[in-house]
Image: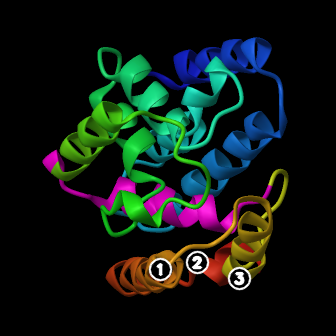
Amino acid sequence: MERDNAVWELELAGEMNPGPWVEHSYTVAKAAELITSKTNRYDSEKAFIYGLLHDIGRKNGYSYIKHVIDGYEYLKEKDKKAAYICLSHSFPNKDIREYQGIIDIDTDKIKYLEKELVSGDYDYYDRLIILMDSYCSVDKYVNLERRWIDVSIRYGVNNYTVEKWKQTYKIRDEINKENSISIEEILGV
């Protein structure tokens, strides 16, 4: 998918279900593009697009875990990687029990989500969007812990939350090391 198409998709989605999630998606996209431009290895345009579309499932209205399935279903014929990132961005360990919030899908959809999630391999872009989703509030970059507290206040925590955070730290450290960068320095947090 091209950048203009991705912007159009998000703008249309925002008209269908206005909310702070749209601005958050732009913030994630800009952060993903910025970090990737410093790697000299990956495509910053793709990073922007994947960041922009990671929450596109929210176009169908207010939901919790359902938004990851809705986004995946919506994009899978348009851009397979962007679709997969709709799934992967919420699960650093590929474990849906990590989800913080209400499970608003039935048992069949849970099984489908688990099957689709484990069918793919997390590459740089999956790991990047997991990370940028954790660095981006609605309209600014924040440190991981501030974002995690915000999410935890809104959605709660569970027995898997700490493992989710540990894996996110691990992803950050791997991307920093692999690319000789400091994500927090680049984002100014």
Task: Give the total of numbered labels.
Answer: 3
Front: mark 3 or 2: 3
Hey, which residue is sitting farthest left in the picture?
A: 119
**Position in image of residue 58 (x %, y %):** 63, 29
Considering only vertical position in the picture, is 7 above or below 164?
Answer: above
Q: Nearer the viewer, residue 85 or 162?
A: 162
Quadrant of the rendered image containing residue 124: bottom left
- Residue hosting label 2: 183
Considering only vertical position in the picture, is 21 above or below 120?
Answer: above
Secondary element type, mark 2: helix
- Residue hosting label 1: 172
Are the residues tagged 1 and 2 within 8 Å (C-beta)? Answer: yes
Q: Quadrant of the C terminus?
A: bottom right
Secondary element type, mark 1: helix
| Main SS of residues in magenta | helix
Q: Magenta region: which residues?
A: 119-137
Q: Earlier in the sequence, mark 3 or mark 2?
A: 3
- Residue hosting label 3: 145
Are the residues tagged 3 and 2 within 8 Å (C-beta)? Answer: no
Marks 3 and 2, how far apart at CA = 14 Å
Which amino acid is tagged 3? Glu
**Position in image of residue 84 (x %, y %):** 33, 39
User: How dense is the environment of label 3, judged by Cα within 10 Å: few (below 14), some, or many (20 and up)?
Assistant: few
In the picture, measured across the screen, residue 172 lies left or right of residue 152, that is left
Quadrant of the rendered image containing residue 154: bottom right
Considering only vertical position in the picture, is 139 above or below 79?
Answer: below
Q: Nearer the viewer, residue 142 or 145?
A: 145
Which amino acid is tagged 2? Ile
**Does the stretch in magenta take in 133?**
yes
Q: Which mark is residue 135?
A: none
